[in-house]
Image: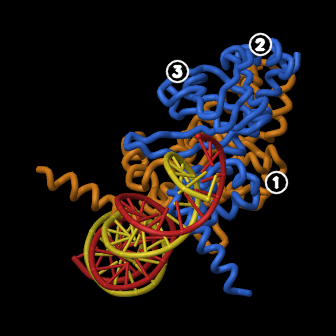
Chain colours: A orange, B blue, C red, D yellow
Amino acid sequence: MKLGEFIARNGTPLVREAGEHVFRQGDQNQSLYFVKDGLLKAYYLSTDGKENIKSFISKGYSITSLMASHAGKPSTFSLVCLKPCELTVLPFSALHEASRTNADIAASIVDFLLNFAMKKEAREYELLCLSPEERYKKLLEETPQIVNLVTQNEIARYLGITPVGLSRIKKRIITTATQNS
Amino acid sequence: MKLGEFIARNGTPLVREAGEHVFRQGDQNQSLYFVKDGLLKAYYLSTDGKENIKSFISKGYSITSLMASHAGKPSTFSLVCLKPCELTVLPFSALHEASRTNADIAASIVDFLLNFAMKKEAREYELLCLSPEERYKKLLEETPQIVNLVTQNEIARYLGITPVGLSRIKKRIITTATQNS
DNA sequence: TTCCGGAATTAACCCAAGTTAAAAGTCATG
DNA sequence: CATGACTTTTAACTTGGGTTAATTCCGGAA
C-alpha cells in the first residue's frame, strides 16, 4: 500500500477558517496534517508575547509537532490558518507503526524525513550564517510570491526581526539599488 | 539484520588526527560517518572567511552532508576533527537502499531521522527565538561539559557570535549574578 | 466620497554585538 | 623559567536592529 492510499484510508478531513487554530503551543497534539488547500503558519510565542514564525505551510505540504507526536511532550509551537484550510488529519503513531510493517510506507517516510531534514538544515544555515538583510534577499529570490500571501509583519517575524526592522531593510535595499543609476 | 550489524558489515574504519578534515565544503562526499571515538566540528565558511559552526559531533553520534549524500550536490559545510577520531564510514546510498528491503533497517533509519529532525527543530528554535546571551545560558545548562572540550572561540561561532561578543556576555552574566550578593 | 482600522513607514533614541587593536592570560616546549 | 604562540579579555568606536510613538498609506464599508 502506498502512502497516498494509506492517508486516504486512515485520514479524516478537517476544515478551518482563516484565523482559526489547529493546535496551540503546549497542546499534546499527536496528529499529522496534510494541507489539501489553504495556508497556515507555525509560530512560537515567547513568555513576553513576542511571536516568531517557524514556517508557512502551503498546499501540498504537511506539518506536525514532533515534540508532541513523536516525543510525547507538549507542542513547542502553535499552528493557525492564514487562509481557509482543507486538511487531512492522521494520527502520527498510525503512520509510524505502518512504517514498521509496510515497506512502501517506510520508504515514503524515509524520503519525506530526508527532505524535511534538508529543509531544516537550510533554515539553520540561514539563521546561523546570514544577516537579516541577507535572509530577506534570499527569501525574495527563492519565493517571491510570499509577499502576496502574507503581511510584511509576518515576513519579518519569519526572518527573526521586527516589522520596523524589515521596513528599514527594504528602504536600504531600494536606496542602495537606486543610487547606482 | 539490525542496523548495528549492517554497519559492522558494510562500514570501513577511518582514523584521523586532530585538525585533519574528513570532507570540505564543496566536496561531493556521499558518506555517512559514525563516531566511534573523538570529536569533530561541522562548520560553514562564508566567502569573506567567517566561520560558523553548525554542530559538534561526539562519540556515539553520526554525521553526513545530506546535500551531498541525498541530493547529490556539493556539501554546504566542512567536517574537521577537533580531537583524534575513529570513524566508521558507510556509503549513504547503501543504507538508503537497504532501508527499502530491510524492515529493521528502515525502522532504525526512521527513528534516527525523527531524532535528527527534533534536534534540528530545537536548534532552529534557539537561533530564531533566543538572544545570543540566552543561547549561551541554555548551552551551559544543557551541555556544561562543552567548555572543557572546545575553545571559547568555537563556542562563540556555534552560538552565531564573535569570541569578543561571548567574552562580553560572560562578563555581563558574572557581574549581574554577583551584584545580588 | 468619506470614514475607519489595520498595515507600513518614519523618526528618535537605545543597546547589544561587530570590528579592530592592544593587553593580559595560559600553556607547552626548549 | 624564559620564550613564543595561541586564547581570552578589554577598550574604543561603529552599526544594525529593537522600542515606542507618531504619521502615512490603503482597502473596505457605509
Look at mark 1 in the image and give the residue it sits on.
A73
Residue at point 67%, 16% (across, down): B91
Tell me: A24 left or right of A172: right
Query: From the viewer's perspective, is residue B7 above or below residue B112?
Result: above
Give, as a three-letter code, the residue at label 3.
Gln
Residue at point 71%, 30% (across, down): B85
Q: Which one is closest to the eye, mark 2 or mark 1? A: 2
Give, as a three-letter code, the residue at label 1.
Lys
The label on residue B28 is: 3
Q: Are marks 2 and 1 in contact (CB under 8 Å)?
A: no
Residue at point 52%, 28% (across, down): B24
* Image mark 1: chain: A
Tell me: A70 left or right of A44: right
Q: Quadrant of residue A145?
A: top left
Q: A56 and A176: which one is in front?
A: A176
Mark-to-mark CA distance, 2 and 1: 36 Å
